[in-house]
Amino acid sequence: MADLNEWFFPRGSLARDGWESVVDQRLAGWARTGIHVAQLSGGRLELPAADVERLVVPLSGTFTVEHDGRSTPLGGRSSVFDGPTDVLYVGAGRDLGIAGTGRVAVAQAPTSVRKPSRYLSGDDVQIELRGTGRDTRQIHNLGWPGALDTAALLVCEVITPAGNWSSHPAHKHDESLPGEETQLEEIYYFEVAPTRGSGAPADADAFASFATYSSRAGEIETRAIVRSGDIALVPHGYHGPAAAAPEYDLYYLNVMAGAGPGRAWLFTDDPRQAWIRARWSEDVPDPRLPYRAPEASG
């Protein structure tokens, strides 16, 4: 029997080396993906050169990344709910330094393949609306085929507006089934905030929920209330839903990678829930989306 919430980590419980959260191969049972998260106030953090490719994702604020003998500014955003951000891919075998003010995440995957570093402007990030009705969510395809040429990394952001569900229907990608499913580890890094115009007080306890359950690839059970900064890992098993409370918007950064060649996100829905996806054609996308930065008032 799986231990309840064995793969769920509250904010700060994975702190190391000046980072608020670190997931990498030093975590027992974890091998293919990683993430570093930090809050900076004009300071600087470094990551050494290694057989690791990385994607720098500003969560809020602006940053400058030193890499490959040069500096790249990342415009960032005020909030993860303000649309896509500039990102920077730094190929394996290169060190990097990050300086600035705000919150930043660095997604990573181990690889011996050397790819050239590349900057991707937030204006060029593909925005996708997935699902309809209360299943509508907004996807930012940051480190995705067609957006960035990485060796193994698959990275996207998901915004789920208040009252909606995402990672739904529950699905899995824990077996290598050619043409049907790819075997991928997955990281969920969460942020939650009062929905726009809610009038919530400054001390509102924004939260959402997230679940996983076992598949034939392994046992897992997550039944978690999630808040900003929390992390859930999915080594195997069905995952979903991620459900936003009616008063709070939900964001998560997904980091995926696998052992197989190529980069493909092929998944299998829980057969008992697969009918839900077929119903999407009968409804329309949530008109609140896409979320972008609020227009400045004159």
Image (cartoon, rainbow, N blue to C red):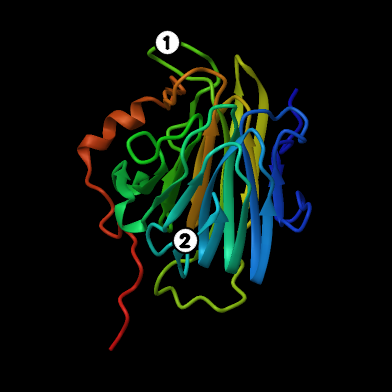
Which is more N-terminal, label 1 or label 2? 2
Q: Is residue 143 above or below residue 11?
A: above
Name the outermost residue toward the top: 178
Q: Is residue 7 above or below residue 196?
A: above
Quarter of the image for the C terminus: give it: bottom left
Residue at screen point 36% across, 57% down: 122
Residue 178 is tagged as 1
Residue at screen point 65% across, 64% down: 39
Residue at screen point 31% across, 41% down: 131
276 horizontally vs 29: left or right: left
Q: Name the foreground residue: 41 vs 114.
A: 114
254 horizontally vs 20: left or right: left
Q: How many marks?
A: 2
Residue denoted by label 2: 80
Q: Percent x, y for residue 191?
A: 55, 57
Q: Secondary structure at mark 2?
A: loop
Q: Amino acid at mark 1?
A: Pro
Q: Percent x, y for residue 281?
A: 22, 35
Q: Percent x, y for residue 251?
A: 49, 54
